[in-house]
């Protein structure tokens, strides 16, 4: 009986992880891709205008902490008192932001 519950818990956990990954992809495409590009390279017109980071860059991924990415998504990024990346605190939950951070980690190849 315990093995059944353990198997069920593992299956539910895997399903939840898959759902979070899919939701993060949808959120990235809806909220981030206009600047970072669908692949995360930051090579869009808006990305070039505002200096969007190339999220596929292994050096960037190696030096960037998850907490920093979380804060940037939640609070936005300002330059000269103007947002160059708008905050998403009112549009995304903390769980959705964490899923986005994990998703962007997977963009590096």
Image (cartoon, rainbow, N blue to C red):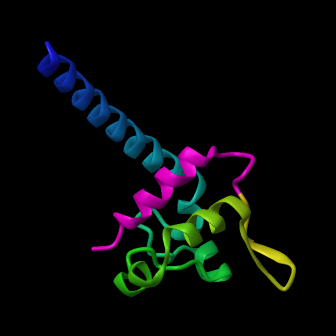
The foreground one among 31 and 43 is 31
The percent position of residue 19, horizontal first and vertical second, equals 38, 36
Q: Residue at x 41, y 78 (%)?
A: 61
45 part of magenta stretch: no
* For residue 97, side relative to residue 105 (left or right): right
- Name, please, the residue furthest toward the top: 1
79 and 65: which is toward the camera: 65
In the rendered image, the quadrant that contains the N terminus is top left
Q: Quadrant of residue 6?
A: top left
Tally of numbered discs: 0
Q: Vertically, is 33 above or below 79? A: above
User: Percent from the top left, x then y, of residue 64?
Assistant: 48, 79
Which residue is painted at 64% across and 66% down in the image? 71
User: Is the residue 59 above or below the residue 92 in the image?
Assistant: below
Q: Point out residue 69 in the picture as x, y percentages from the top left corner.
A: 56, 68
- From the viewer's perspective, is 53 left or right of 7? right
Give the extent of the magenta segment.
Answer: 88-109
């Amino acid at each position: 009986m315990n093995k059944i519950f353990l198997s069920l818990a593992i299956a539910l956990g895997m399903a939840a992880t898959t759902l979070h990954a899919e939701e993060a992809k949808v959120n990235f495409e809806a909220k981030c891709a206009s600047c970072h590009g669908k692949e995360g390279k930051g090579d869009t017109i808006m990305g070039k205008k505002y200096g969007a980071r190339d999220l596929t860059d292994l050096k960037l991924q190696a030096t960037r902490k998850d907490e920093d990415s979380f804060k940037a998504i939640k609070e936005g990024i300002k330059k000269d008192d103007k947002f160059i990346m708008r905050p998403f605190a009112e549009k995304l939950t903390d769980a959705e932001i964490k899923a986005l951070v994990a998703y962007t980690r997977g963009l590096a190849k």
